[in-house]
Each structure stands twice: as structure tokens, then as C-alpha cells.
Amino acid sequence: MNTGAPRIEINEVGPRDGLQIEKAFVPTEEKIAFVDALSDCGYARIEVTSFTSPKAIPALADAQDVMRAIRRRPGVIYTALVPNIRGLERAVEVGTDELNLVMSSSETHNRANLRMTRDQSQAELTSILQAARAAGVPCNVSLSTVFGCPFDGDVPVSEVLRLATQFVEAGATGITLCDTTGMAYPSQVADVCEQVARAVPGIALTAHLHNTRGMALANAIAAWQTGIVRFDAAAGGLGGCPYAPGASGNVNTEELVHMFQCMGIATGVDLQALLAIVRGLPQLVQRDFSTPLLSAGHRLATHAPPAWLAERFGPA
Ligand code: COA
Ligand code: ZN
């Protein structure tokens, strides 16, 4: 139980998880400007893009151009998603600071998303871990569908523990537990996070939550209470996996930051600077979507009372 970790770290995944599912291709220069603006918000990490097949994820076909051109702000770790050896080669070539390897905890989602069996993916990622160690690039492993698979339903925790343990033994420096389609609920999140933390003690765990069913913030609190201090989140709540039916946005970064700020937990992120970026997101992705925190403002963004109050009751 977390008795009050005073600080959390946020990995902004908007440029990767956020843009991968968008229909309108965001021009390369606009992606670069998006990442550069995020760099000034105070994030620990920014997941800039993914080095996947351009046929699988056309929205991020310009991964190398983006990674090459972004401004590298000291102190920010620039990461990218990598599913195979080809992705590793492309990522290393353009100086990605840290790789985020990916495979699913469930068999069917792995086959649909990565066109490999889980065993094939595990072998591929194990080779990447070896090659990345030789190249001196740290690797986190993201396990998708940990809290449920849109094809297979509930995923045995034993499978999550097996994969997490084997990847740590193979050299992963962190494990991300992904709720790919928002199937997680708080008591499950607490239980799974505790079990994984016991299985891989001392390894940094990250929670990757989607708000598909409105439980992302509740799940974040549940994860934090078990001691997790790293969270993936997407500005504006963009995001979703194109190979998972019904997938929708990540936990909103601005809502996550606002919530933890209210609780006195430092996130490092400048909420005003982030909200200024969120304001421009509908234009970036060329569709309208609601950004409730932007409309409502900070909880203490109070309003002037109606003028008639002073007439009726006198000055407050
Ligand atoms: N980067 C760029 N191109 C790649 C690539 C990579 N990492 N991996 C494969 N390719 C290319 C191959 O060169 C080949 O190109 P060609 O048809 O012009 O010869 C083509 O993609 C198919 O290659 P293959 O090895 O047969 O891959 P696949 O079709 O079996 O797909 C993946 C496997 C993993 C590459 C693909 O499913 C993928 O990129 N998935 C990512 C899904 C994702 O990001 N989901 C959301 C995040 S969880
Ligand atoms: Zn996701």
C-alpha cells in the first residue's frame, strides 16, 4: 500500500498511442512541433513514435524523420515503441534514448496486433533485449491486454507474471502493464500490480490505462496505492490500438496531472502549458472532441458571482 509517494512520473504517449489510431495523417512537421511543445511541459518521458511496419501503422510511417528532428530537451527521455528487430534497427539509427518493446499477454490480441504468436513475439523481443544491451540502449517491455483481451476475455495473471519475470531475466529495465481496451477495474488493478511487483522486485512498473469504460482515473489511484509511480497518459485523452476492437483513448494526461496535483502529489508537469497544447489538439488531428478539463479549468478556477448578489446581499 502506498502511504503517499510524494511524486509520480508521467510518460506522455500522445504522439505515439494518440496519433497511431487517427485517420487524418498528421504532417511530419506538426508531429515534431507537438513533441517539441510537450518537451517544455515537464514530462519524465515522451513516447515520440513507433518503429512499426508502415503498413500496420501508416499514421507513424515517418517515425525516423520525427525522431531525428525533435529538439532534445535535457532531462527528458525520448522513447519509442518497437515490435521487432527491424524496429530496433530503425530506432537505434536515429538515437532513440529508450525502447518500449511490446507484446500482448493474450494470444489472440498478439496475433491480431503483431501478426505473431506470443512465443514468436517473446523470442523476437528477447533478441532485441540482447542487441539493445550491446548498443547500450535501455528497454522497457509493455505487456498489452494485461487486464483483459477484447478477443479472449480475462487473461490469467499467471501469464502476466511469467512474461514479466522472463523479460526481466532477459534484461528489461521496466515493465508496463497495459489496459489496452479499458477492461480493468480498480480492485483488479491493485491485485495485479501487487502480484507483479512481488514477482519482479526492484523493477520499475508503469501503468498504461485507457478510459474506454470511464475507469482510468480510478484505476490510476488503485495502481498508485500499490506503489506504482510511473504512468503513461495521452494529452487530450487521445489514443487507442487499431487492432483491438472498441479501443478508445488513453487516460487524459491533463486529468491525471490535475487529480494528482489536487492530492499534493508532484507530477513535474506544468498543467497550464499542457492545457495550451490540448487546446490545439482538435486542429492537429482534424476532428473535434471534448476536453472537459479545458472547458472547466482547474477546480479552483472560480467564477465571479452574479452581479445581482451584491445588490441583494451587499458586498461579500
Ligand atoms: N519497421 C518498418 N517496416 C517494417 C517493420 C518495422 N519495424 N517490420 C516489418 N516491416 C515491413 C517489412 O519490411 C515488410 O515490408 P514489404 O512488404 O515492403 O517487404 C512488411 O513490413 C511486412 O513485414 P513482416 O515481417 O512480414 O511483418 P508482418 O506483416 O508480419 O507484421 C509487424 C508484423 C510486427 C511488423 C506489424 O504487425 C506491426 O508493425 N505491428 C505494430 C502494431 C502496433 O503498433 N499496434 C499498436 C500499438 S500496441
Ligand atoms: Zn494504449
Image (cartoon, rainbow, N blue to C red):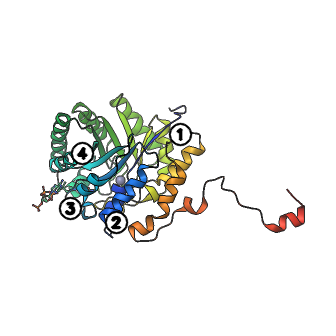
The verdict on label 3 being within 8 Å of ligand 1 is: yes
Around disc 3, counting alpha carbons within 10 Å, would you say few (fewer than 14), some (14 to 19), or many (20 or more)?
A: few
Indicate the amino acid at tag 2: Glu
Q: Residue 292: which quarter of the image?
A: bottom right
Sequence-first disc among 4 and 2: 2
**Looking at the image, do the residues carrying marks 1 and 4 touch, with CB atoms under 8 Å apart?**
no
Residue assigned mark 2: 22
Quarter holding the C terminus is: bottom right
Q: Residue 17: which quarter of the image?
A: bottom left
* Camera-nearest residue between 120 and 65: 65
The verdict on label 4 being within 8 Å of ligand 1 is: no
Distance of mark 1 from mark 4, alpha carbons?
29 Å
Distance of mark 4 from mark 2, alpha carbons?
26 Å
Q: Is residue 60 left or right of residue 185?
A: left
Distance of mark 1 from mark 2, alpha carbons?
31 Å
Q: Where residue 110 sits: x, y (%)? A: 23, 52
Task: Inspect this view and state whether residue 245 appears.
Answer: no
Around disc 1, counting alpha carbons within 10 Å, would you say few (fewer than 14), some (14 to 19), or many (20 or more)?
A: some
Indicate the amino acid at tag 3: Pro
Establish if 70 lies above or below 23: above
Q: Is residue 252 left or right of residue 172?
A: right
Indicate the amino acid at tag 4: Gly
Sequence-first disc among 1 and 4: 4
Distance of mark 3 from mark 2, alpha carbons?
14 Å
Residue assigned mark 3: 54
Q: Is residue 69 left or right of residue 125?
A: right
* Camera-nearest residue between 48 and 207: 48
Front tag of 4 and 2: 4
Indicate the amino acid at tag 1: Ala
Residue 95 is tagged as: 4
